[in-house]
Amino acid sequence: MKLIEDANKEAVKRILEGEPRLIDILPAREVLKGLKEKMILHAGPPITWDRMCGPMRGAVAGAIVFEGWAPDLKAAEQLAASGGVEFHPNHHFGAVGPMTGMTTVSMPLFVVENAKFKNRTYCAINEGLGKVMRFGGNDESVLNRLRWLRDVFGPQLAKAIRALGSIDLKSITARGLSMGDELHQRNLACSSVFLREVAPTMARVVEDKEQLAECLAFIAKNDQFFLNLAMPMGKAMTDPAKGIKGSTVVTAMCRNGTDFGIRVSGTGDQWFTAPVEMPEGLYFPGYSEKDANPDMGDSAIVETIGLGGFAMAAAPAVAGFVGAGAPSAAANFTRSMSEIAVGQNPEWTIAAMDFAGVPTGIDVRLVVETGIVPLINTGIAHKEPGVGQVGAGVVKAPMGCFTQAVRAIAKELGVS
Amino acid sequence: MSDEKKSPVQKLLSTEVKVVNVGLEGFVKDLKHCNIGVVHVDWSPPAGGDPAMAALLAKLGV
């Protein structure tokens, strides 16, 4: 159908033309329009407290104590269960967040602007590994790190970003892909390149040398630091592709630990949801699939722009880490995802595939026709709140989201 | 029986068998176990075999 083909070409064109740049770090209350006290933004499509999984509830309780809305975790859970806080998806506020994806008023957020279309997106700073709120952690060590990010790291890194003017995220991504990153489960190269870009300026603008050393060490020790920049980059690139009549291109994929949700260009902000699946992967010593929580996070926005599982061929080491097979099998993931994508990104290429561009623009029609669903590289959280990450793997997007989307687009176009 | 007098099927079965397996991958393992050369083609019916959905997709240009 020509209308759909033309609409999809336009959607992919807008995604590829994006120029995402990091321009600032600011508290959520200053940049998220409509965000108020006692309001919690979470990963994935909309969900209520009674349907939230363990790690999501743990993170919510921690966020409430962090903001001072309750004195301790027990009181925080009571507040959440009694309707004392409002829950909304990050996506409804122009934001994204990994795993539980907590965003509240005082958290510092990366501000990413798509210079081509002038739209902005936001994401909290990656907390590092171990016990962290994104995996449901909520003890004093977790809250103290968030306070340090709010009071020290965020403001100091913001000074450097402002001094630099902006940082081009697309170019860092291109370099990272050629250095073995796929930008979902491996961000080591991009994080290192980012550190190289900001370190000299930080040395100039941060007066307290001890704080400077702590800030630089925090980035250097966190291999996943860049994930929280790749995510708002992804949303900044896909948001301009929303609302093109007839387009069957996916503009967002995300999960909240209970449901998986997608948005499609031609149907605007409507969510198509289905029960989220369990990741298949490898577990850290002492843990097994019995400990695992169903998949969660807004991070599947990176697969929506052709990274993560779609760019597995660029990161053979990740294939082993997520239990997806031998490094030689990594290219098959990318080939398979090409079957359901409208085009390729000529600026993000994979050397191991003769510099083919990453598959870009997931077409819901092709997903349903071929039976090939998007594959997402993901971390695996413990199902109990507060434990943290227990493994890494690959999760399949549920087919139900895509069949619903095809029917909705057909209805929109008067096709039956 | 000389080779000239054999039917095409008889000729096929009296020479080395090479298999192209389409669809269900389970057969591949059995053939490999018998040391029979096999190439697998990953295929499934359009729209998971749902005729109504396949018809709808055809109208949407797939």
Image: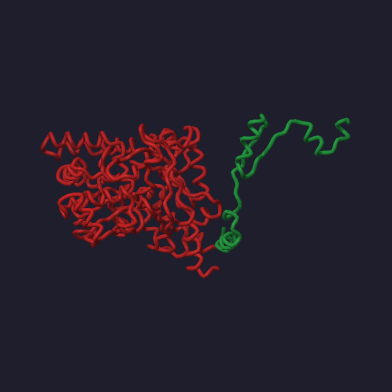
Chain colours: A red, B green
Front-most of A138 and A265?
A: A138
- Percent coordinates x, y for residue A315 in the rendering: 42, 36
- Percent coordinates x, y for residue A64 in the rendering: 20, 53
Question: How many labels were placed on the picture?
Answer: 0
Front-most of A357 and B35?
A: B35
Q: Quadrant of residue A381?
A: top left
Q: Is residue A118 visible?
A: no
In the rendered view, would you say A237 is above or below A312? below
Question: Which residue sits at x=13%, y=34%?
Answer: A210
The outermost residue toward the left is A208
Front-most of A138 and A108?
A: A138
- Percent coordinates x, y for residue A96 in the rendering: 31, 52
In the rendered view, would you say A258 is above or below A384? below
Q: Quadrant of residue A240?
A: bottom left
Q: Is residue A365 visible?
A: yes
- Percent coordinates x, y for residue A241 in the rendering: 40, 58
Question: Which residue sits at x=25%, y=60%?
Answer: A86
* Left or right: A359, with A236 as reference point: right
Q: Quadrant of residue B25?
A: top right
Q: Which quarter shows the C terminus of chain A? A: bottom right
In the rendered view, would you say A36 is above or below B17? below
Q: Which quarter shows the N terminus of chain A? A: bottom right
Question: Which residue sits at x=47%, y=39%?
Answer: A355
The outermost residue toward the bottom is A414
